[in-house]
Image (cartoon, helix red, strand yellow):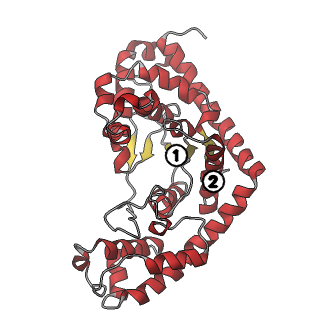
Amino acid sequence: MDKFPELVFSGVQPTGNLHLGNYLGAITKFVDLQKTHDCIYCVVDLHAITVPQKPAELTSNIREVTAAFIAAGIDPKKNIIFNQSQVAEHAELAWVFNCIARIGWLNRMTQFKEKAGKDRENASVGLYAYPTLMAADILIYRATHVPVGEDQKQHLELARDIAQKFNNDFADSIQSTSGRDAFFPLPEPLIQGPATRVMSLRDGTKKMSKSDPSDYSRLNLTDEADSIAQKVRKAKTDPEPLPSELAGLAKRPEAENLVGIYAALNQQTKQEVLTDFGGGNFSSFKSALVDLAVAKLGPIGTEMKRLHADQAYIDSVLASGAARAKVLAARTMQDVKDIVGFIR
């Protein structure tokens, strides 16, 4: 297999109401990645419309995610930040991949089954074909690494399968047009230590989610200090004191969640947190967590709001990023057309 220069691609859906789970689970990792890799960060608005969206809300959400990237510390000059729909080659390559991928492969995708629910016949074709567009998002830049959570590992495997099949199906053409043995890399998952899985503040067995009807279930990145304090103090706990050892968190999901949040925000291990707070009651631990959360999230929320209000700046970042992304994407698409046999 040919050697490809390392490049990281990651996409985030513009769902609005970004919360602590989005921040600790993804955005902080993106900030760290830019120190070691060339990175492309994409607001995947084409993916967003696989389910119904209100146009004005979608526009606002695209800007909100972009503002969150920048507020958290991603440098738009060092990295490429753009929204997917501005680079038409994503959709163009996705069609080629629709003709490479097999129905049986897509039928195995568990996320479609979960999102479509029982009424699959009424789900959009876009929701079904979502994974081929995700493969195109990655491979239009010939990215070698993708930071993924558990729910996207299967989609990355499909992207690898599509890349492999393209390389095999067009092996002779690839060799004659580019002199290479393979045109697309097989992208690898980028694992950055243990994933921070942030659970609901009202139920430690469920993931923190914007779809939860209770706003007290989550810390939104734009929450004011008073709101953060109120939510943390009202977070569900149990009557036992905090343990001093990790084993003591077993079967105590709410306690484990709050300890995990503190550890992630303070860049500690859970055991280090328990060493500091073990044996104490939840009220004093929650007070410390409030102070930490306000100190860490407050400046990000303030900057997010400032940036989001400056639409001209956010749109200029997206336009500049799209122009840079398009140079790379167009080069790949031209080669794909030559390999497949299109006239251009």
User: Relative to 99, is 109 above or below?
Assistant: below
Residue 336, horizontal then vertical, whole percent: 51, 19
The structure residue drawn at horizontal position 34% and vertical position 44%, both measured from the top left corner, is 153
Residue 254, horizontal then vertical, whole percent: 33, 73
Q: Residues within 10 Å of mark 2 (few under 14, many from 20)?
A: many
* Left/right of residue 50 with respect to residue 150 in the rendered view: right
Front in this rendered view, residue 78 or 157: 157
Residue 151, horizontal then vertical, whole percent: 36, 47
The C terminus lies in quadrant: top right
User: Relative to 235, is 93 above or below?
Assistant: above
Which disc, if any, is residue 64? 2
Which disc, if any, is residue 13? 1
In the rendered image, is residue 242 in sight? yes
Q: Residues within 10 Å of mark 1 (few under 14, many from 20)?
A: some
User: Relative to 93, is 192 above or below?
Assistant: below
In the rendered image, is residue 180 in sight? no
The N terminus lies in quadrant: top left
- CB-based contact (under 8 Å), mark 2 and mark 1: no
The structure residue drawn at horizontal position 49% and vertical position 19%, both measured from the top left corner, is 178
Q: Amino acid at mark 1?
A: Gln
Q: Amino acid at mark 2?
A: Glu
Sooner in the amino-acid sequence: mark 2 or mark 1: 1
Say what secondary structure mark 2 lies in.
helix
The structure residue drawn at horizontal position 39% and vertical position 20%, both measured from the top left corner, is 100
Which disc, if any, is residue 247? none
* Left/right of residue 84 with respect to residue 116 in the rendered view: right
* Left/right of residue 137 with respect to residue 60 in the rendered view: left
Front in this rendered view, residue 221 or 205: 205
Residue 251, horizontal then vertical, whole percent: 22, 72
* Alpha carbon separation for disc pair 2 and 1: 11 Å
